[in-house]
Amino acid sequence: MKYIKKFLKGFISIILLLVIIAYLTDYEYILKGVRVVYMTGHVTAYIDDYSHFENEEIANGTAQPWPLHKAYNTTKATSQLQETHNKLGTVAFLIIKNDSIWYEDYAEEDGTTYGPTSKTNSFSMAKSITSALLGKAIQDGYIKSLDQPLGDFFEQYNTSATTVGDLSSMASGLDWEESYTSPFSVTARAYYDDDLAETILNQKVTETPGVSFKYLSGNTQLLGMVIEKATGKKLANYVSESFWKPLGMEQSALWQVDDEDNRLAKTYCCIASNARDFAKFGKLYKDQGKWNGEPLLDAAFVSKSIQPRFPEDDMYGYGFWLSNHRNKDIFVMRGILGQYVITIPEDNLIIVRLGHKRGNFVPGASFTEDFFIYVDEAYAMLTNSSKS
């Protein structure tokens, strides 16, 4: 007993020392990461973690539910698709054909039942929504164009040639470490720290902007700060009036913020919503910015967003990932754990997948293996249906 007490006393002393060091060195955000992740039984950020953070509500208005296709859920998932769902923990999978829900499936796991109204973390799918807000802010006259200098909004970037379009297209030249494993990385600090603006505005432009693609979450966070400064509106309110209400989202959503005092939206990630509502951004862009036949977002901006900005980096446009799988022009909203809104305009097809994990990257490709499975197996299901 004597030795146990001595051990516990020493252990507690070490923990207290580490806590003190974390606060003295401005790494106290790691303590929040430990509390939110490890003390809840996880090893990284997870789809239901939004409840551990401060959030702003994105209010919806009058709901415009998706119609159900006449063949709704008459075709079963292929064995390959079901195997992938089981392996990677899919919680929601939708196939929307001709603007109607053709197939829909949700998971039940560990006492949790997911369904059409279940909120889960978007992760980086929020980058596409933030880029859509940029288009809306230009359309509304708050921002001049994609070419407006970043220095017009934040004086510390006066000497940089970086534009707001560079932020949206991942070409800013910012010195940002896109690391998801190191607790000391700026990405981890941005996720768990309580002063996101300070973290972002300490980033320097160290490479020539506007010449090539380099995926950096700091780009979209800085873009969100530009939009908020230009409009003078909280982003949750601006996205509500610009998209959530006009698109007839079925549920309100939550946008994670950094702190109860600062309340700066994490625009590079972290909108908690459901599969049906996320899918509406695929339809909006598929229809060149129109909703119910009326222009909601400038068609030229939409068209530019879903085409490569740089021919040598043809996997990205402005806020959207791009693919030519199956020789089709595909644009994609994508999150770190395999969150997808996959839109294939030529076939009037939208595929949504939300879940816990994604697969491994395919060598030489900018997507993981599960992305290709979701697309291929959706087409296989549609083919099976046409044969029956």
Image (cartoon, grey):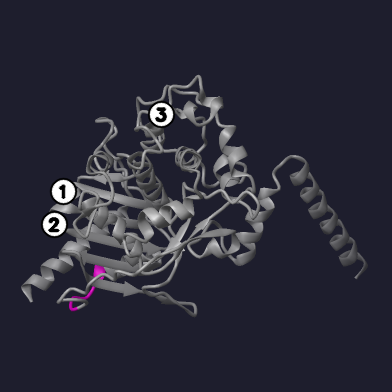
Question: Residue 125 in the image: x percent, y percent?
Answer: 39, 52
Left or right, residue 189 beside residue 238: right
Q: Are marks 1 and 2 in contact (CB under 8 Å)?
A: yes
- Label 2 CA crowd tier, 10 Å (few <14, some 14–19, many 20+): few
The residue pinned by badge 3 equals 163
The reply to whether residue 214 is in sight is yes
SS of the residue under disc 1: loop
Q: CA distance from mark 1 to mark 3?
A: 31 Å
Question: Residue 38 in the image: x percent, y percent?
Answer: 62, 61
SS of the residue under disc 3: loop
Q: Residue at x 53, y 30 (%)?
A: 154
Is 207 drawn above or below residue 8 in the view shown? above
- Label 1 CA crowd tier, 10 Å (few <14, some 14–19, many 20+): few
Residue type beneath disc 2: Asp
Q: Main secondary structure of the magenta part?
A: loop
- Taking the magenta stretch, the answer to whether it contains residue 59 is no
Q: Residue at x 54, y 62 (%)?
A: 49
Magenta segment:
74-80
The residue pinned by badge 2 equals 347
User: Which of these two is toward me, 228 or 131?
Assistant: 228
Quarter containing the N terminus: bottom right
User: Which of these two is toward me, 175 or 109?
Assistant: 175
Question: Residue 239 in the image: x percent, y percent?
Answer: 41, 53
Q: CA distance from mark 1 to mark 2?
A: 9 Å
